[in-house]
Image (cartoon, rainbow, N blue to C red):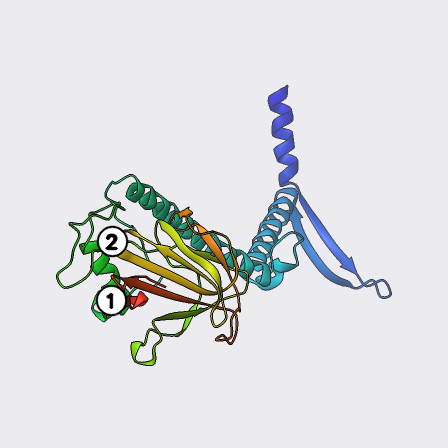
Amino acid sequence: MAKEKKRSFFKRLRHKYRFIIFNDNTYEEVISIKLTKMNLLSLVGGSAIILIALVTVLIAFTPIREFIPGYPDGTMRRELIMNAIKLDSLENELRIREQFVENIRDIISGREPRTFDYTPDTAMRVDDIHFTRSDHDSILRTQIEGSEQFSLEVTNDMILAGNPPAAHFMPPTTGLIINRFNPQSRHYGVDLVTEINQPVLAVMDGTVTFANWTVETGYVIQVQHDNNYLSLYKHNAELLKRVGEHVSAGEAIAIVGNSGELTTGPHLHFELWQNGSPLNPEHYILF
């Protein structure tokens, strides 16, 4: 029974039908098409497939896709690309910072720092890089060669040929040198211009041997260090230490000011002496 129904269904699909269009006024036959149900299903299915394919091609390869709600337009795509590039750069910078911090920890712990793995964004030929020795590099090289590695202790054995004992000095303040050491003009130090109320720091451990006011240089403080080093700090706005007090390297001992008659603005006049002779501070301190 089921087989007979199935056969009758396929037979009905093969039954032929005629589709005719007449002119309503003259009853003239305009179009006459003979079809079966199978042909009609095939025609409709094929047309649907072709239509879907055409719509897919239009959406995939033409700007029409930008009109679809939620689809990114050209501006949004460019922003996504730029954000991806920035994210990659940030990840690279974060990796470099982490390596830098690890190297600092190794140096503080006395271990050899690791190789700094850095991959630049743009290719660079090593042959195109030329290095020149600067004054700061020479000063730093002299200080390191004259002292023990990773040691901050100054001993009498650390003596360079023809030079005073090697020592580690800290910058007295942050600023720009506007007047350099010049014994011919009786200027026995350097002038560092900086913002007013900046702290003045002791360049080395020592004892305060003078802390008072002078007419020409205002508030002056003087510190005696080991190996007969003597440091002077002039034109201060205020003195934070008194005579006889012991100070440590990097400890605030005064405030930058503009005191005294021989001054033209907020700055620090710094001098460094040894055994009664003035020294050029730029040969011993990296300002």
Image side of residue 15 versus residue 160, left or right:
right
Image side of residue 174 versus residue 49, left or right:
left
Counting from the top left corner in percent of width and height, residue 206 is at: 35, 50
Residue identified by numbered label 2 = 227
**Furthest-left residue in this view:** 161
Residue at 18%, 50% (x, y): give it: 156
Amino acid type of the residue that numbered disc 2 sits on in the rendered structure: Asn
Snapshot quadrant of residue 139: bottom left
Residue at 14%, 64% (x, y): give it: 162
**First in sequence: mark 2 or mark 1?**
1
Q: Is residue 14 above or below residue 62?
A: above
Label 1 residue SS: loop
Label 2 residue SS: helix
Residue identified by numbered label 1 = 125
Image side of residue 201 versus residue 65, left or right:
left
Residue at 46%, 54% (x, y): give it: 253
